[in-house]
């Protein structure tokens, strides 16, 4: 009996287990739960195996890139997919394990603000009692003295910690001022409304500054969520720099691009390990893994482009000077847009 592929209707031979045209497995159209689970586990573990094989090759600088252009690609995850997964993993590590915040401006201030609210509450209670006692003809002077003394002590404590926060734009223009108590108790609109004479940018900056001061961790998460776009944008620029540095070798741009993807994957994995180690055991592991990632790039450049150590070190330095410039420009754009769009 002649058999046909149910997917593309190609005629199948008796020995065909898969369609020679579309590759679909020759199996009954009715799918069992066992098959579904088997397909899931097969795909997951096959992907995991490819991932760990890829990481094992990454441990040898430039090895995965060389294998890729030798045509040995099936056993390893494609460069863009591997980079995409690693970026997501790296951002997740930053979000969950990093002990640092991009903005450390208000953790202590918010604690102080809550303490100010408590002090004001106690002062308000004393004022209420004092007003009630004022209606009594024969006041106890000792009670009045105790109340006044308590109020003065709370007021001094309140004034001592109620610092003033000032927003200054471009190093000279004072745009907004508010106290920690006002930051804690007034609405966003009430605070921002004080900046009546500001232009559009000053008004937006005032509002965003207050939001940031009130919740710096939220802004950090907001920026980290958009950091992935910068990580993807920087790759073609760095590959272009490498194409310029190694122009005499006349390699295709895609070779520089894949090399750039692979060495960034290795760097992100190394730094992610450092962040996790900092979180669990403390120390300066993140800094150490960052230095190791730079050493990795130097060795990878030597192995992939096969130039002398002197020339490799020179181009490594040029690459990272230009890398720093590109990174700072993209990071500045990211910070500005994130600050302006932060809700």
Image: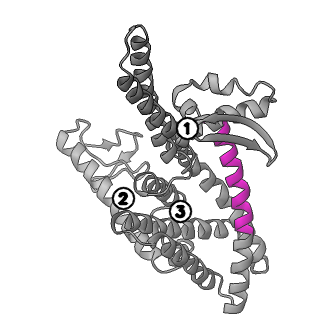
Q: Earlier in the sequence, mark 2 or mark 1?
A: 2
Residue 251 lies in what quarter of the image?
A: bottom right
Mark 3–mark 1 Cα distance, whole angstroms, equals 59 Å
Q: Do the residues labelled 3 and 2 touch (CB within 8 Å)?
A: no
Q: In the rendered view, does 137 fall on the left or right side of 105?
A: left
Q: Which of marks 3 and 1 is nearer the N terminus?
A: 3
Q: Main secondary structure of the magenta part?
A: helix
Asked if one can make out residue 16 in the rendered structure from this viewpoint, the answer is no
Q: Which of marks 3 and 2 is nearer the N terminus?
A: 2
Task: Say which residue label 1 marks.
Answer: 159
Q: Where is residue 271 in the image (x, y as percent from the top left)?
A: 48, 67
Task: Say which residue label 2 marks.
Answer: 47
Mark 2–mark 1 Cα distance, whole angstroms, equals 62 Å
Residue at (26, 37) in percent of width and height: 29
Which type of secondary structure does the marked residue at label 2 adopt? Answer: helix
Task: Say which residue label 3 marks.
Answer: 79
153 is within the stretch colored magenta = no
Q: In this view, does 299 lie above or below 78?
A: below
Q: Position of residue 179 (x, y in %)?
A: 60, 35
Q: In this view, does 112 lie above or below 245?
A: above
Residue at (25, 52) in percent of width and height: 41
Which type of secondary structure does the marked residue at label 3 adopt? Answer: helix
Query: Around disc 2, counting alpha carbons within 10 Å, would you say few (fewer than 14), some (14 to 19), or many (20 or more)?
Result: some
Asked if one can make out residue 284 in the rendered structure from this viewpoint, the answer is yes
Q: Give the range drawn in magenta.
A: 322-342
Q: Are marks 3 and 1 in contact (CB under 8 Å)?
A: no
Q: Position of residue 82 (x, y in %)?
A: 48, 60
Query: Around disc 3, counting alpha carbons within 10 Å, would you say few (fewer than 14), some (14 to 19), or many (20 or more)?
Result: many
Residue 205 lies in what quarter of the image?
A: top right
Residue 305 lies in what quarter of the image?
A: bottom right
């Amino acid at each position: 009996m002649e058999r046909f592929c149910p997917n593309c209707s190609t005629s199948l031979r008796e020995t065909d287990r898969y369609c020679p045209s579309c590759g679909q497995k020759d199996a009954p159209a009715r799918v069992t739960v066992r098959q579904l689970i088997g397909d899931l586990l097969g795909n997951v573990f096959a992907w995991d195996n490819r991932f760990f094989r890829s990481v094992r090759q990454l441990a040898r600088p430039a090895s995965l890139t060389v294998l890729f252009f030798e045509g040995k690609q099936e056993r390893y995850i494609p460069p863009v997919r591997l980079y995409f997964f690693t970026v997501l993993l790296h951002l997740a590590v930053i979000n969950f394990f990093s002990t640092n915040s991009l903005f450390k401006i208000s953790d202590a201030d918010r604690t102080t603000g809550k303490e100010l609210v408590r002090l004001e509450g106690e002062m308000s209670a004393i004022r209420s009692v004092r007003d009630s006692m004022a209606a009594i003809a024969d006041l106890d002077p000792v009670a009045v003295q105790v109340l006044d003394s308590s109020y003065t002590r709370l007021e001094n404590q309140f004034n001592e910690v109620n610092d003033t926060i000032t927003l200054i734009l471009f190093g000279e223009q004072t745009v907004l001022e508010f106290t920690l108590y006002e930051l804690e108790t007034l609405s966003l609109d009430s605070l921002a409304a004080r900046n009546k004479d500001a232009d559009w940018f000053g008004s937006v900056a005032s509002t965003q500054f207050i939001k940031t001061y009130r919740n710096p961790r939220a802004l950090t998460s907001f920026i980290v969520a958009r950091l992935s776009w910068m990580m993807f944008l920087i790759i073609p620029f760095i590959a272009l720099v490498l194409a310029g540095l190694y122009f005499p070798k006349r390699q295709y741009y895609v070779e520089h691009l894949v090399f750039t993807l692979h060495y960034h994957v290795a760097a992100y994995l190394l730094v992610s390990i450092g962040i996790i180690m900092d979180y669990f055991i403390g120390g300066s592991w993140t800094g150490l893994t960052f230095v190791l990632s730079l050493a990795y790039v130097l060795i990878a450049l030597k192995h992939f482009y096969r130039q002398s150590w002197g020339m490799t070190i020179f181009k490594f330095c040029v690459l990272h000077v230009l890398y720093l410039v590109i990174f700072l420009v993209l990071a500045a754009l990211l910070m500005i847009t994130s600050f302006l769009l932060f809700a």
